[in-house]
């Protein structure tokens, strides 16, 4: 969600007359789009702000803006801790940023604007997509769940669904521009339809995406097990361009901890969904999120999480040590887990998941996979040139190419997998086939348009936004 918001911020600023500063040049504006899910986000923001303070002191025209979830959470306290920040804007008013920057410049005073509710669906804002051929499309914003560890609902608001006609209009427009991969995005994406009372709305949306000529791949994230229905599994299995990968957060394998987290499903429900997905799509993969060290988690609770990881055979698990967030019910629960115990459990789960991931990746050694070539490429050794992409089932694939005729980012490569590791699979032979796509054409056009800034287009960093 934050990645897509950053694309919108970039689009707004480009439309307002800014250009992206080249690497190693001094920007006139730095924008921080923040997260608030983990405590480290606070430390990173204020550390970066202090790094910029000397520049601000010697150049009053240099501007700093802070947006996103931390801005929504901390509001005026950001200015109190860093009075040299020019603009603080929240999750519900991204579109106000250019006006707030101009007002701060004219009035020579910090501007704080935090709206408590969404006025316009954010996908109506202009966006500068990070990729020319792969795009996020928001279907909803906000969340109606009340997970005890999560601060997001209080910062993003209640769930608000976007009309399906608007979603499909954006999808078709993106495909016309050369996009070949779409990821449908929502805090709780498979609850889509709650606003207008249609529990089958998300499955219908997947099937509509299947009718779009030129759209090669459709993904979605992140679904909630509570709202996962059989019609979504059927739509995934029956719609050729919907990819056979499911990212579905588990959070814990213990029913007792799931109840304390207020997750509204239990282990059997979760594993039942996985069983149905694999029955309908035998070649599918599952990825997940897991939190270790939630308040009150016992050794037995953690052992149950390890059991589920073994049983589910996740392709990958994004594992996190519980982070206490002020304002959440879990922050004041008794039996907070000591850091050393939490770290020990995290390391044990990570070790187990690495073993599982390698075993799951070994299953495709010798098979032929279709890979969408990624935006970036790199040399993994001095002898051969290798590029990177994702298979249909979301495995990271490194593959060798002929340097005289490499595929372009956005093209589709058919290649045979020869080796596996926990985090990627490797294709050591040259591709069996390279299919040029409109996505590759769009990438070439983006690079030609960008010229010397080609590598900088997309995600704003400390040196990317400059007023002309």
Image (cartoon, grey):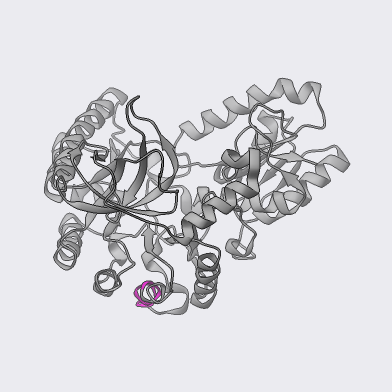
Query: In screen coordinates, is 214 left or right of 19?
Result: left
User: Which residue appears farthest toward the front when viewing the image?
Assistant: 404
**Residue 344 percent coordinates (x, y):** 23, 26
| 445 relative position to 426: left or right | right
Q: Which residue is more in the foreground, 312 or 447?
A: 447
Query: Is any atom of residue 306 visible in this view?
Result: yes
Give the quarter of the image for residue 303.
top left
Viewport quadrant of the C terminus: top right
Q: Position of residue 246 (x, y in %)?
A: 28, 57
Q: Nearer the viewer, residue 301 or 359?
A: 359
User: Residue 43 appears at what percent x and percent y?
Assistant: 52, 28
Where 139 sits versus 39, above or below?
Answer: below
Q: Residue at x 71, y 50 (%)?
A: 14
The dominant secondary structure in magenta is helix
The answer to if 201 sits in the magenta stretch is yes
- Side (left or right) of 63 relative to 360: right
Q: Quadrant of residue 169?
A: bottom right
Image position of 317 with respect to 142: above or below: above
Q: Is residue 129 visible?
A: no
Residue at 88% of width from left, 42% of height from top? 106
Q: Which residues are magenta?
A: 199-206
In percent of width and height, residue 364 lies at 16, 48
Q: Nearer the viewer, residue 326 or 443?
A: 443
Q: Which residue is the extreme one toward the right?
A: 106
Give residue 187's quadrant in the image.
bottom left
Q: Nearer the viewer, residue 402 or 427?
A: 402
- How many numbered callouts? 0
């Amino acid at each position: 969600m934050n990645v897509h918001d950053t694309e919108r911020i970039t689009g707004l600023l480009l439309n307002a007359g800014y250009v992206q500063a080249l690497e190693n040049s001094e920007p006139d504006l730095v924008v921080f789009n923040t997260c608030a899910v983990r405590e480290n986000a606070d430390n990173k923001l204020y550390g970066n702000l202090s790094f910029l303070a000397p520049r601000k002191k010697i150049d009053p025209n240099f501007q700093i803006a802070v947006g996103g979830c931390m801005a929504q959470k901390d509001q005026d306290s950001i200015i109190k801790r860093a009075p040299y920040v020019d603009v603080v804007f929240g999750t519900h008013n991204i579109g106000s940023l250019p006006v707030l920057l101009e007002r701060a410049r004219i009035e020579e005073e910090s501007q704080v604007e935090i709206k408590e509710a969404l006025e316009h669906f954010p996908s109506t804002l202009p966006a500068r997509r990070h990729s020319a051929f792969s795009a996020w499309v928001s279907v909803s914003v906000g969340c109606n769940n009340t997970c005890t560890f999560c601060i997001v609902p209080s910062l993003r608001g209640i769930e608000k669904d976007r009309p399906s006609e608007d979603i499909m209009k954006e999808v078709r427009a993106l495909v016309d521009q050369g996009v070949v991969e779409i990821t449908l995005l929502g805090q709780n994406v498979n609850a889509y339809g709650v606003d207008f009372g249609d529990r089958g709305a998300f499955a219908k949306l997947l099937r509509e995406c299947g009718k779009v000529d030129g759209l090669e791949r459709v993904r979605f994230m992140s679904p909630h097990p509570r709202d996962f229905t059989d019609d979504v599994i059927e739509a995934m299995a029956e719609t050729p361009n919907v990819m056979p990968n499911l990212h579905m957060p588990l959070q814990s394998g213990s029913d007792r901890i799931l109840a304390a987290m207020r997750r509204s499903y239990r282990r059997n429900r979760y594993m039942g969904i996985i069983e149905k997905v694999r029955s309908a799509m035998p070649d599918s993969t599952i990825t997940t999120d897991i939190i270790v060290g939630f308040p009150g988690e016992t050794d037995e609770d953690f052992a149950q999480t390890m059991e589920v990881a073994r049983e589910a055979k996740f392709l990958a698990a994004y594992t996190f040590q519980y982070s206490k967030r002020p304002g959440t019910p879990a922050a004041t629960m008794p039996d907070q887990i000591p850091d050393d115990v939490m770290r020990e459990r995290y390391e044990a789960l990570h070790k187990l998941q690495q073993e599982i991931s390698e075993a799951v990746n070994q299953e495709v050694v010798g098979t032929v996979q279709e890979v969408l070539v990624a935006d970036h490429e790199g040399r993994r050794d001095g002898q051969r040139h290798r590029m990177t992409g994702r298979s249909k089932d979301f495995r990271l694939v490194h593959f060798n190419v002929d340097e005289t005729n490499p595929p372009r980012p956005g093209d589709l490569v058919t290649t045979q997998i020869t080796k596996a590791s926990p985090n990627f699979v490797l294709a050591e032979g040259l591709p069996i086939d390279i299919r040029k796509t409109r996505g590759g054409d769009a990438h070439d056009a983006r690079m030609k348009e960008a010229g010397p800034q080609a590598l900088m287009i997309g995600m704003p960093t400390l040196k990317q936004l400059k007023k002309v």
